[in-house]
Amino acid sequence: MNYVQECQTNNISTLYSIQNDSENSFSLLHSVLGYTQTEWMIEKKSVTASKEFIILDEKSPHAFVRIKPKDSTSQSVEIQVHCLRTCHQFNISSPLKTILTQIINYENTTRFYCFLFPFEKKEQSLLKNLGFSQEAIYDQHIYSKGKYLDLLVFGTERIQTL
Amino acid sequence: MNYSGLLLKLRKPEQEDMPVITEWLSDDLFLKNLYGSPIDSQQNRFQRVHTFLNQNAKDFSNNITLIADDHLTHTPVGLIMLNHINWCHRNTEMNAAIGDKTIRNAFYGGDLYLLGLMYSFFALNLHKVFGYTYSSNEAALKLNRFGGKVNGILKNHVYRNGKFLDVVTHSVLKSEFLTFLESQKNRLLLKHSKKGVFNDFF
């Protein structure tokens, strides 16, 4: 059974070790662990720090989710989702939906959006299942390892509130 | 720095430009179409202009603000704002706005936009310039196709004046801009070519 846990120092250590031998290492490096573990801990103490969650089962983590600070005026939140190598064997859609529902309920958020690389197929499929659609492609937006990569923008329809 | 277009000339703002920029930031029409947060008080406007100058003073600032003067009158007429410059990925978000109400038309707007792109690609050596436009701003939508393309539409993305608005994202790569200049030098940009606007770059 999968469950959600707020990301703590012990989780981040695990993620660092996974990143080192992950096929998807660039993705993690780009938006999640672009800084060192020490820098991560410093950032975590900041008032405006993002909320970070791990979706895991009894044995190991399967996905990392980061919820960035809300844009209060537009009631929008950027999220980052990273599926780890083992995640295809598990249903992480439901725990992720739980996280987003909590954010909607407690933070008056009415729209989510997410940036993904074209090769992040698992994440794209996951978001589409949750009602996200691809809204834009930022071509050649990120420079990595000597070449420019496209970035896809996925977003949800604005949730109507009274 | 010498970036001259057909009608305008680009330069970094000086302290004596602060009152005129502050005045533009008080103009509803100027702010209506400018992508970003509203500025609500005179004090905030002045602070913001002060920030522009401070950011410009740094060698590798992430935000650069430029002012455009009219060739004929030598008075400031518009602003180019290069925000969130990413020196690693070599891209920036560009906003161009004409402050002088009397000359808000396609000729000045187009010239300003062209100068912004030239500065980004030829002075800063950026790889890509991108921008956001409210879907209601038809003039800017037309202008953003100047050598570039639309990347997509972010649905109901921002809240302005009581409703959520779609935001159109667009971008120009340096390679696309060079192709555009080459293909249009005897057409849309004929007057610019004759005046030698691109002479320093080719």
Image: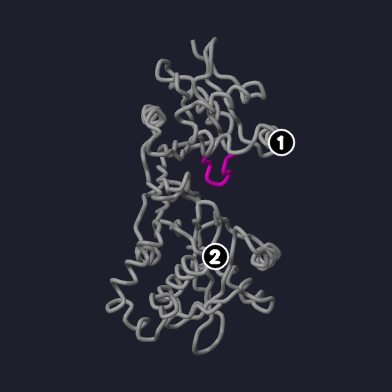
Label 2, label 1: how many angstroms apart (C-alpha)? 32 Å
Count residues near mark 2 (Cα–Cα under 10 Å), then give few for <14, some for 14-19, many for 20+: some
Left or right of B44: which side holds B24?
Answer: left
Count residues near mark 1 (Cα–Cα under 10 Å), then give few for <14, some for 14-19, many for 20+: few
Q: Position of residue A79 (x, y in %)?
A: 51, 35
- The residue where tag 2 is placed is B81
Instruction: Determine the chain carrying the residue at label 2.
Output: B
- Magenta region, residue range: A69-77
- Kindly report which numbered mark, 2 or 1, lies closer to the viewer in this rendering: 1
Q: Position of residue A101 (x, y in %)?
A: 50, 26
Q: Amino acid at mark 1?
A: Ile
Please tell me which residue is depicted at 41% across the width and 80% down the height of the picture: B199
Number of labelled discs? 2
Q: Position of residue B95 (x, y in %)?
A: 50, 63
Vertical order, A162 against A143 (above or below): above
- The label shown at residue B161 is none
- The residue where tag 1 is placed is A42
Left or right of A125: which side holds A81?
Answer: right
